[in-house]
Image: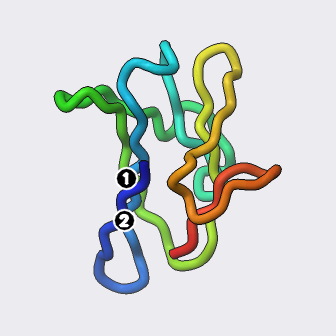
Amino acid sequence: MLKRSSLFGFKTRVTFSIPGTDPHGAVSVVGDFNDWEPGRHELVQRRNGTRSVSVILSQGEHRFRYLGTDGLWFDDDTADLVDGEGSLIKL
């Protein structure tokens, strides 16, 4: 699930969130905003049972996917678009 919060200027805080138990192991959000670097934005377990991480992004379109343990790639069905290249968010 994606949550967007407008910040000053042309920035937006995007919170990437998934259910806390599936998939097992570490999960990172990777995308064009972090040079597709695994582990840079790892989702953290929250008290409400989800895992999430917030990233400040500039206006425009951003591609991303989630990367789990053992190379498990998956997309966010709440993104603005999901296609063969992954998830897309438009800010």
SS of the residue under disc 2 = strand
Identify the residue under disc 1.
Answer: 15
**Residue 21 position (above or below residue 15):** above
Asked if residue 84 lies left or right of residue 91, the reply is right
* Neighbour tally class for label 2: few under 14, some 14-19, many 20 plus, Cα within 10 Å: some
Q: Residue at x 51, y 27 (%)?
A: 27
| Residues at marks 2 and 1 touching, judged by CB atoms closer than 8 Å | yes
Q: Residue at x 54, y 31 (%)?
A: 39
Q: Residue at x 50, y 73 (%)?
A: 58
Q: Residue furthest front?
A: 77
User: Residue 4, how many percent across, how many down?
Assistant: 36, 65
Q: Name which residue type carries label 1.
A: Thr
Instruction: Name the image quarter holding residue 72.
Output: top right
Q: Residue at x 36, y 25 (%)?
A: 20
Q: Residue furthest left?
A: 47
SS of the residue under disc 1 = strand
Q: Residue furthest bottom?
A: 9
Asked if residue 91 lies left or right of residue 66, the reply is left
Q: Which mark is residue 4?
A: 2
Query: Is 14 or 19 nearer to us in this picture?
Result: 19
Decide which of tag 2 and tag 1 comes sooner along the chain. Answer: 2
User: Residue 67, how many percent across, how many down?
Assistant: 62, 31
User: Residue 3, how many percent across, how many down?
Assistant: 36, 58
Colour scheme in the image? Answer: rainbow
Number of labels in the image equals 2
Q: Name which residue type carries label 2.
A: Arg
User: Residue 65, how many percent across, how many down?
Assistant: 63, 44
Instruction: Name the image quarter holding residue 43.
Output: top left
Query: Is 65 or 33 nearer to us in this picture?
Result: 65
